[in-house]
Amino acid sequence: MDEPPTHQAVLDEVAPRLRRLRARSGLTLAALSEATGISRSTLSRLESGLRRPSLELLLPLAAAYRVPLDDLVGAPETGDPRVRLKPRPLASGGTFVPLTRSPGPIQAYKLVIADRGAEPDLRTHEGYEWLYVLDGRLRLVLAGHDLVLGPGEVAEFDTRLPHWFSSADGRPVEVLSLFGRQGERMHVRAKPRA
């Protein structure tokens, strides 16, 4: 793999880039000086590499040439901004995708929950969970309650209570989960009055 260029190597490429831009635009040093407010001698030294480029000098040049500042300094292209999420299997069937990239008190997950059978296997653990059903029907058994949640419905509970969830109708259900490992709760604001 190629090594990234050093700062000095990047700066060394600015002078020839400025010369090429001025030649392509057909401007003289005098005309460019008038357009940018930068003296002809400073422009000449920039183009010959005798003057170190600075932001104060490059910004008016970028405006005069109508190019992004990145083009003047040869900034590397940024990578693909899309986040590539990696699905992982749930031990009890289904898949989860971590949505939170950094550690913190509350973690976000997308769950795709399969049918785990009709007989609940209640579990407890430290934490607090908030579930939002995106698609499908979720069966949630929580302590003494047996609930079925549909799209747009939410449940929140202390995970120290015995709980279990599964698809309610045999088809996979998609759920957004916010989970606080140490019992942190979500902060929900009330809807403003009309």
Image: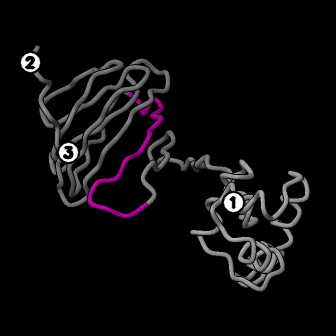
In magenta, the rendered stretch is 102-117
- 30 horizontally vs 58: left or right: right
Q: Is-magenta flag for residue 190?
A: no
| 121 or 33, nearer to the observer | 33
Q: CA separation, marks 3 and 2?
A: 21 Å
Q: Is-magenta flag for residue 116?
A: yes
Q: Which residue is mark 2?
A: 193
Q: Amino acid under label 1?
A: Leu
Q: The N terminus appears in which quarter of the rendering?
A: bottom right
- 109 horizontally vs 150: left or right: right
Q: Quadrant of residue 49?
A: bottom right
| 177 or 142, nearer to the observer | 177
Q: The C terminus appears in which quarter of the rendering?
A: top left
Q: Residue furthest left?
A: 193
Q: Amino acid under label 2?
A: Arg
Badge number at residue 87: none
Other-residue count near label 2 (Cα within 10 Å), few / some / many at <14 / 14–19 / ≥20: few
Q: Earlier in the sequence, mark 1 or mark 3?
A: 1
Q: Amino acid under label 3?
A: Met
Q: 124 above or below 169?
A: below
Q: Which residue is mark 1?
A: 61
User: What residue is shown at x 78% (from left), y 62% (from top)?
Assistant: 30
Q: 119 above or below 149?
A: below
Query: Which callout, 3 or 2, points to the residue nearer the camera?
Result: 2
| 75 or 186, nearer to the observer | 75
| 22 or 166, nearer to the observer | 22
| Circle 2/circle 1 CB separation < 8 Å | no
- 16 horizontally vs 88: left or right: right
Q: Which residue is mark 3?
A: 186
